Amino acid sequence: AHAYVEQALHVAQELGDRRSEASELHQLGVLAQVAGQYEMAERYYRTSLTIEDAIGNVQGRAVSLNTLGNVYASLGDSQAALRAFEESLLICRQIGDRAGQSSSLRNLGAAYLELGRNEESNQTLEEAVMVARSIRNLPSLGYGLLSLSLAQLAAGRTEAARLALDEALALFKELGIEPPPAAKGLQVDVSRR
């Protein structure tokens, strides 16, 4: 996959197609991130972000910031992650990108949870779930409910955590999506309380 994306990047650069160049750089960032090469992913995302800014692609900027926030979180830079998610969310709200809002809210809520800001996490994740539900983005809804379950559990709301988890798992099953491995551990934690 990496070689194919590199080739597509080269073609985009030869043609002077900046939008495709940004997109291919973003894809290289995704591949690096999945491989655990976070510094490399950060470089690809930052370069993509620079191009998005240069060509005025506001939605592309929001997407790049959201994924860059995930890289910062993986690198342990929670404050940089928060700033990236907040800016992504602001842009998505300004341009009316509800799917982007749901994703940015979910990531922002997870960042708040990582920092121990449980109430902010719960409020943000409840909004993420509400937005995903309103646009019928069912995979996003499932992941939002799973994150909300974690936040509810951290806030000591075991029954609310159980309800969110049960709904997420039922949704994943209905969609034929394998739940993330963390869901098993969460099930154990919820059942112990």
Image (cartoon, grey):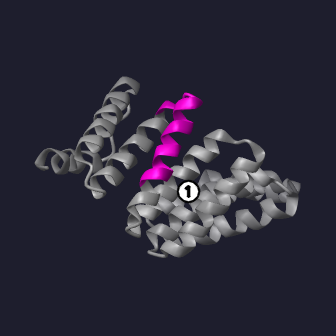
Q: Residue at x 30, y 39 (%)?
A: 165
Magenta-colored segment: predominant secondary structure? helix
Which residue is located at x 50 percent, y 62 percent?
Answer: 33
Q: Is residue 1 magenta?
A: no
Circle count: 1
Q: Considering depth in this image, is 186 or 39 the residue closer to the camera? A: 186
| Residue 133 is one of the magenta-drawn residues | yes
Seen at 24% across and 41% down, the residue is 159
In the image, 145 versus 117, the foreground residue is: 117
Dot 1: within a 10 Å radius of its alpha carbon, few (fewer than 14), some, or many (20 or more) residues? many
Q: Position of residue 118 (x, y in %)?
A: 38, 61
Tell which residue pokes out farthest to the left in this image.
192
> x%, y% of residue 28?
60, 59
Instruction: Identify whether 127 is placed above or below 91.
Output: above
Magenta part of the protein: which range? Answer: 122-138
Q: Secondary structure at mark 1?
A: helix
Residue 37 seen in the current view: no
Query: In this image, 126 relative to 90: left or right?
Result: left
Left or right of 127? Residue 169 is: left
In this rendering, position of residue 57 left or right of residue 78: right
- The amino acid on which the numbered mark 1 sits, given as a three-letter code, is Val
Quadrant housing residue 115: bottom left
- What residue appears at the point 64 percent right and 54 percent down from the top-left corner? 89
Q: Which residue in the protein does label 1 denote?
A: 30
Residue 15 position, x and y percent, is 87, 54
**Camera-nearest residue between 156 and 84:** 156
Q: Is residue 120 above or below residue 4?
A: below
* Residue 147 visible in the current orientation: yes
Side of 159 relative to 93 (left or right): left
* Residue 143 image point, x, y percent: 42, 42
